[in-house]
Amino acid sequence: MKFIRADLDKLTAYTSHPGGEITIPTDTLDTNESPYDLPRELKEKLAWTYANEIPANRYPNGSHGELKSAIAHYINEYPNTNVSPKNISVGNGSDELIRSILIATCLGGEGSILVANPTFSMYGILAQTLGIPLVTVGRNEEDFSINLTEAQKAIETTNNPPIRVVFVVHPNSPTANALTPQELDWLRSLSQDILVVIDEAYFEFSQTSVVEELSQHSNWIILRTFSKAFRLAAHRVGYAIAHPSVILALEKIRLPYNLPSFTQTAALFALNNRAEIFTSIPETLQERDKLYSDLSSHSTLKVWKSNANFIYLRLKAGNEAQLTEELKSQGTLIRHTGGGLRITVGTPAENSRTMQRLKMLL
């Protein structure tokens, strides 16, 4: 079809389950979601609210005022932090916010983006769908920190178009390592002409953030999500925290009514009941450490420490793709990405079954 852009032939559509749909009962440990649904009582309250208080024939609140205020209150629980609703933009998942950032900065040949691989694939996928050049650098194999020499050289030598946005994840996906002091110093040193996007999707598990530094860096954006610790992956809620001028640019690009009424209500419910929802976090961290210990005991595996709700590993002999398919055939889904395997921490039962299957296969 000649009306379709020719360069799209070179791209592969993102899929949450590469290799096709799943037809057998599975332990879904490949998408970094929480393994726990919302508590039943909260789901029942949410269903009652939808049935009695949300008119289906009316558009959602397009300004997200109440939700932004609640998010700001939550953010300010972090020490030395003071943000307001003017510092927040809400998106249909972080993916929409990433796309808006790219449109606001690089579209029309005005800029390219820099990422360090392996990392979250959607930065590159979204850039390429918009015709925005992608510049990649490597990571140090020992701890997966960014190769800062390569990164700085890329900043200095990429001119047509120049690098406008640097994307980092804190902690990184799929490798689960938090930003090092050296990486943070490098980000602080970048020109004000470069936007620094720090994705903190796993903040609730790492409890490591740079949000208290935002007031010192008008060229920084922090991204967060309700899809992980808040257990709302089905509702697709993400938010950006940044200088009001940056937020204003994102709001100009955001599609109207981008967040359904039910989704906004679910996010408010989650924020107002976060103490109950977050009770699963300590168990997840405990299970993560146990899973790390069990995996590390296998001489055939190279396993890295995690600051998130997943673990990254590689087979010393390779064959990660084969192992992924063999686990899938037995009912465990994990993610083959970045040259290794990413395993989400599930329930104790899911983790136990996964280890049993891995031991047999290895």
Image (cartoon, helix red, strand yellow):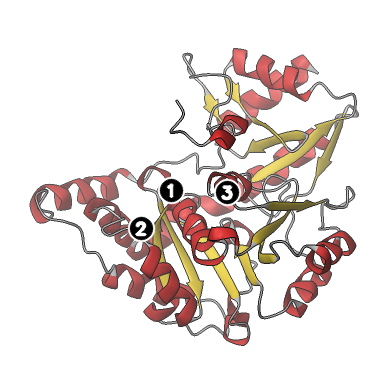
Query: Which quadrant, please, contains the N terminus?
Result: top left
What separation in Å lies between label 1 and label 2 (alpha carbons)? Answer: 8 Å
Circle 2: is it few (<14), some (14-19), or many (20+) Cα within 10 Å? many
Residue at horizontal 66%, vertical 59%?
112
Q: Earlier in the sequence, mark 1 or mark 2?
A: 1
Q: Which residue is mark 2?
A: 270
> Could you tell me the amino acid type at mark 1?
Arg
Location of residue 129 (image quadrant): top right
What separation in Å lies between label 3 and label 1 (alpha carbons)? Answer: 33 Å
Residue 68 in picture, x, y percent from top left:
35, 71
Image check: 58 left or right of 144?
left
Location of residue 37 (image quadrant): top left
Up-down: is 345 above or below 69? above
Residue at horizontal 43%, vertical 52%?
93
Say how many tags the image has. 3
Give the residue at the far front of this rendering: 2
Residue at horizontal 55%, vertical 38%?
31
> Could you tell me the amino acid type at mark 2?
Ala
| Marking on residue 231 | 1
Q: Which residue is mark 3?
A: 131
Helix, strand or loop at disc 2? helix
Residue 139 in picture, x, y percent from top left:
83, 52
What separation in Å lies between label 2 and label 3 (alpha carbons)? Answer: 37 Å
